[in-house]
Amino acid sequence: MVSAPEGVVWHASGLYPRGMRTGFAKGQISLIQSPCVKLIPVSSKQGIPSRSENYSDWYNELVVRAGLAEHSAVAGCMVIKPHGYALWENMQRALDDMFKATGHVNAYFPMFIPKSFLSREAEHVEGFAKECAVVTHYRLKMDPNGKGLIVDPEAKLDEELILRPTSETVIWNTYKKWIQSYRDLPLLINQWANIVRWEMRARLFLRTREFLWQEGHTAHATYEEAEQECLTMLDVYRQFAEDWMAVPVVCGVKTENEKFAGADHTYCIEAMTQDLRAIQAGTSHHLGQNFAKAFDVTFQSAEGKLEHVYATSWGVSTRLIGTLVMAHSDDKGLILPPKLAPVQVVFVPIARDDASRALTYAESDRLAGLLRAKGIRVTVDKRDKESPGFKFNDWELKGACVRVELGPRDLESQSCIVALRDTGSKAPMPLEAMVDDMPTILADIQGRMLEKAKEMRNANVKRVDTWEEFEKTFEGEGGPGFILAHWDGTSETENIISEKTKATIRCIPHVPFSPDDELPGVCVLTGKPSQRRVVFAKAY
RNA sequence: CGGGGCGUGGCGCAGUUUGGUAGCGCGCUUCCAUGGGGUGGAAGAGGUCGCACGUUCGAAUCGUGUCGCCCCGACCA
């Protein structure tokens, strides 16, 4: 039996912390029960597995226990709980403002796509056909043979409808009617919507059959203008990731293998998780004239010529929440950047009796009011039945950025204890100073989080030049970080590398980590000439 | 779709090999104390053991069928 490291609770007899979904079959559990197999260490009574021990379990349990989301029994989908949705709303608000600032407006298009639409763009069908949910009937009825509710065979649709896996096709079918003249361009529209992709395996926020996202769809008169739009939106995503999420990202272009089905080329932002894998956080596609041709969208130019428009599409999804969790959080729970955290400051009033409870509650409310007047999101935790210790842990789990403890002793000295979630530091502070400094405290946390994530990321960017070393680097469970290596530029080589090592090319970066990365070399697998290094990683 | 496995209070599980009428932990309810890092005690509520048929005096347990779910793989924002 393995001995437990100090400060870590190991669950031996129960095998798993209370409430933890094992996901194992009975036989598998008895294997774990046997003395030779390692147990899962649990970092707290709440039962989040240790991040370093099992990243995947840690992530899953954290998302559930922090109240962000849970698996639904329905159709392999996810339920986003209020805390998770509040986070999403904050993200939406910030993104939406950025879209508006770059000249876009919102609209909404149907979620049903006639099957024939999907087949108009050859690459597009090929990319999405394997994961479509299809509506075939429009009515149910009671079975005459008493088998209950059945699909009415007489209500079969002439043409099946696909639940949108992405909206290019419906939107371009609509744009055809909206665009006649160069005066109608550019058309800059965004949609907030849900999307269905029938994935075989779900991971909360990272891969679920239904997810929420935003998809921008624009039409332009020239290739160059569309290209500019693509890059503008990629930069909006980069800014959002860095300034709001405090997650540094690599901007770059996807290889042919990894680009969007139907795109001319795809730009992306790639983040690094704490288990040193890559996660695609957002994409921006230059669709060329592919969809314009497929849906026959033309415009008359100022010179009177009829031309097909150029298109872009770009999107980020609730996957950003997964990215946020994977980039920052720890064994105690979520660490959320103040700019996005649903609860920036939580007051935990501490009481000895009814009298002191009334006092600390009232004072907490008063101080919370002062902070709210500064635009800070504040909660006062007045749950009577929970102990202060429980609340401390609970809010650390939920990712409140700052905790203010206020007890009878503090009231006497007109001070409070201020605890920071990101560093874990805890110090007394005069009440007035706490109120005055709170915006700065929050801004500091935001800054520190980005710095810390940058350091982590930069410390895990490596250059590899031989195949032997490359293969070795990608052995094992987690990821090795971002591996900069030379590649001969062919899909064949990329495929062989990914089969052998599970490593994929995340992107060809716009800005090199070092100028030398853009010098020519030889492909790490084939030895053929390579123009520059590209980013390899294991991806989520 | 291939390969494994599991269905027992709200959640996590034991009990099945060797049939005897269901148990544990958490959660929940009420009360008392407690409250500055997951608080202690007491008393309660809650399950015809996925479903159907069969074997048996008797089935959570054995047999057959059926439904559902999970894990590994292919796919993937």
Image: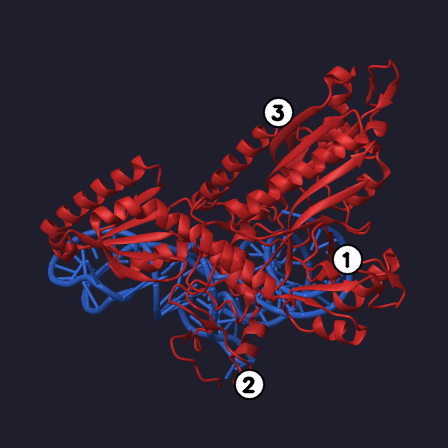
Q: Chain of mark 1?
A: A
Name the kind of residue labelled 3 in the image.
Ala
Q: Earlier in the sequence, mark 3 or mark 2?
A: 2
Q: Which residue is mark 2?
A: A36
Q: Earlier in the sequence, mark 3 or mark 1?
A: 3
Residue A127 screen position, x and y as percent: 79, 44
Colour chain B is painted in = blue
> Residue, x 43% and y 54% (percent of image)?
A66
Let me know if residue A311 appears in the view. no
Q: Which residue is mark 1?
A: A518
What is the C-alpha distance between the residues marked 3 and 2?
59 Å
Eye-nearest disc, 3 or 2: 3
Name the kind of residue labelled 2 in the image.
Cys
**Is residue A199 shown left or right of residue A349?**
right
Closest to the observer, A454 or A9: A454
Q: Which mark is residue A107?
A: 3
Eye-nearest disc, 3 or 1: 1
